[in-house]
Amino acid sequence: MAESEAEFIAVSNRKGGVGKSTVAIMLAHAAAAYGRRRVLVMDLDTQCNASLMLIGGEAWDKARRAGKTIADYFFDRFDKVAEDESEYVVASAGDVAHPRTGEGRVALLPGSLLLEDVQGELFLKQAKTGQDAELVASQVRTRMKRLMKHFGMDYDLVIMDCPPGLSFAALAALDLADRVVVPFRPDFVSEFALDRASLLIEKVNSAEELAEIALAKRRYACLPNYLRGTPRERLVLEQLALDHPMLTSRLPELASVARAFDWDMTKKTMEQKFGDALPHIRALHDELFGASRALGRRQAV
Amino acid sequence: MTKEMKTLSGAALDRYFRRVLRSEPALTPEIAERLAERLKANIASLKLRREAQSAEAADPAAAAVQGPVPGFDPYSPNLVVVVRLAGRDAALAALAAIESPDDLRLLAREQQLSVEPSVATPAELRLAIVAAAEQRIANRRAAARGA
């Protein structure tokens, strides 16, 4: 099926404040600029930070008022057969000068403050069939996953910016994802967050079961973010690397990254947008997608 | 004069140099530190007379300057990693090279391994540190089980 040809990447961590939206946006821009890929960012977080970073407050508000957000998409299309979903998408997103159409572009399915409410409504709608609650929840998640998968027809890469919690949408995204990037801050609390995230992604119930899956076979990879280069960080990274696959790429704590997420109406180059963070973003892109991917798309992972 | 002597080397020797030099009022702290570094670089071990050992132990000024050895790395060895990969005995062996209670406490603090303040001797501290590392590992496993 054409819809399955896109690569789906979830950026997820149950812990908040680890830079999920930031990483999602950086990857989207890098994949468009260096990989010439048609990228869709799907904003599943009710904080809507990815949307604000990509289209600014006014355009996001306009999409919200027009009923063109991910919550509207799920609600409108839940009971319907597949239709053209492009009306929900902002075709040209971000303040980096990518092409507006064709290869190397970034689009956005805007987030919604109401996504969690809509999930509740969909659950109640589905529950009318009188089935067991767990089964109903599973059906809602499966339907949401199918709806998300439709976007694979029009894009090469779909980046799903997941919320910190475990909503139906987040679980559907993790189920759909070909790979999951788990950004984290290297502190001691992150150990627990990564352990929990990994169990969920690999669908196992304990650290012992997880250990039976070789690191190289895991569907997720952890991305150390906000690094300051302290010895305590090194300690934590060494400990986490015993249990979880770590990306070689590291994202240091840089003012240029913080500044880069102020949305601006003026289009910029990647260098102007990301400044001294750009080499790190490029390295992350190449590690995740392979330097050879810069020449094409959909090579084996 | 007794002929019983104690051989000092490594961190203990380093500590001895600093203790002696810092207790000399004619030396500024900077000069004392420079001399200690030079002696540390040039001398591998020395034999300390018994009465010198007693004098050091009885001197409150000397005790006051006792502290973590400069240059001591409290992040090495990574205790949790050693316990995970090589077990309890290997972790205790890795800590054996650290003789100073202050250094052991510093390592515990920086690696967030909880040790009771009442634990005093180096041997007890090493055991407590390894037990704390084992507890950390057990806590992580238990927390993940509830996910």
Image (cartoon, coloured by chain):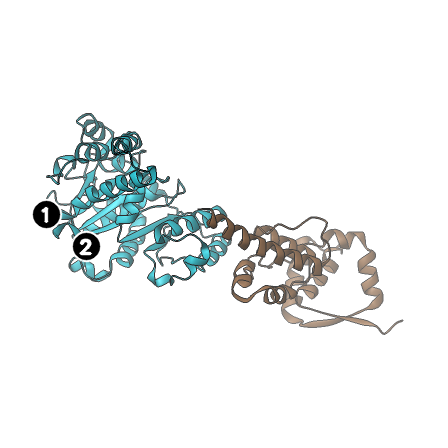
Chain colours: A cyan, B brown
Give left or right: position of B54 versus A114.
right
Which quadrant of the figure has residue B42?
A: bottom right
Whether residue A126 is visible to the viewer of this picture, yes or no, is: yes
Q: Earlier in the sequence, mark 1 or mark 2?
A: 2
Looking at the rendered structure, the kind of residue marked 2 is: Gly
Picture quarter containing residue A296?
Answer: bottom left
Residue at image mark 2: A35
**Residue that appears at 66% across and 56% down:** B128
Label 1: few (<14), some or many (≥20) within 10 Å?
A: few
| Residues beneath discs 1 and 2 located on the same chain | yes
The residue at which mark 1 appears reads as A102
Q: Position of residue A81 (x, y in %)?
A: 13, 39
Marks 1/2 in contact by CB < 8 Å: the verdict is no
Q: What chain is tagged by disc 2? A: A
Q: Where's residue A59, x and y in %?
A: 20, 30
Classify 10 Å Cα crowding around label 2: few (below 14), some (14-19), many (20 and above): many
Query: What amino acid is at disc 1?
Result: Gly
Q: Secondary structure at mark 1?
A: loop
Report helix, strand or loop for mark 2: helix
Image height of B98 relative to A24, above or below: below
- The alpha-carbon separation of the residues under discs 1 and 2 comes to 13 Å
Q: Between residues A295 and A163, which one lies in front from this camera angle? A: A163
Q: Position of residue B97 (x, y in %)?
A: 64, 66
Q: Chain of mark 1?
A: A
Residue A49 picture location, percent across and down: 30, 36
In this rendered view, identify the residue nearer to me: B130 or A125.
Answer: A125
Residue name at image x 37 percent, y 45 percent = A13
Q: Residue at x 14, y 36 (%)?
A: A80
Between B33 and A290, the residue placed more toward the observer is: A290
Q: In the displayed structure, does residue B122 sit left or right of residue A27?
A: right
Instruction: Identify the image quadrant of the N terminus of chain B.
Output: bottom right
